[in-house]
Image (cartoon, rainbow, N blue to C red):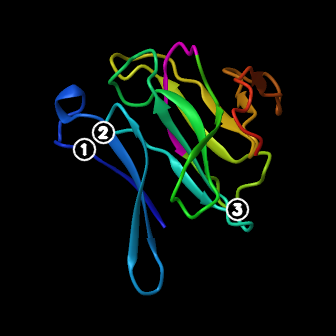
Amino acid sequence: MILYLTSKGYNPGLESGAFQWWTARWTGKEWVFRACFTSDHNYDHGTLYAEPDGTWRIIAPSDPGPQPRGTGGEMVLWLSRDEGATWTRGRTLTSGSRFNHSYARQPVAADPGFYALWADGSPLEPTASDLYFCTREGEVYRLPERMTDETARPERVKTARPERVN
């Protein structure tokens, strides 16, 4: 399976239109291409999971962020239970953020308690950047900016209620 996005042109922003996210899946005989959702920048990046029960999950910055039409935005957990034919918003992971979030990554052998990792920051100017991670169910945590001991607890970030039960 492949997760990618397309647009009407190479430029970010309005002149290239909405940026369409897609999945591509090889069935063993042919490629199946299916649209997922849109976002507002050509450098937006998310991660796709295929789970043992057949659920597909995407964690991506598909909602506009505080720096609209800049890389990233607000992170959303998307769900499909029919191999990407339809997608539902599982949970809004971030909202009302100071900076855009982007580049969600899937840890190798992702654990349900550490399911995706990403950073925030302004795409328009140099800023501080925080690191975040979420659980499979969409609970979001921010890593400490500074650590004074060998270990530290991450801070739980208040997120929206699930739009749908996972």
Q: Which amino acid does label 1 sit on?
A: Ser
**Camera-nearest label, 2 or 3:** 2
Q: Does the magenta stretch include residue 126?
A: no
Say whether marks 1 and 2 touch (CB < 8 Å). yes
Please provide percent x and percent y for residue 92. 63, 30
Residue of label 2: 42
Mark earlier in primary sequence (2, 3): 2
Q: Which amino acid does label 3 sit on?
A: Ala
Bounds of the magenta segment: 96-104
Per the image, the residue denoted by label 1 is: 7
Tell me the amino acid under the disc marked 2: Asn
| Circle 2 crowding by C-alpha within 10 Å: few under 14, some 14–19, many from 20 | many
The percent coordinates of residue 3 (x first, y second) are 44, 56
Give the crowd class for mark 1: few <14, some 14-19, many >=20 residues within 10 Å: some
Query: Is 101 colored magenta in this rendering?
Result: yes
Q: How far apart are marks 1 and 2 (CA)?
A: 7 Å
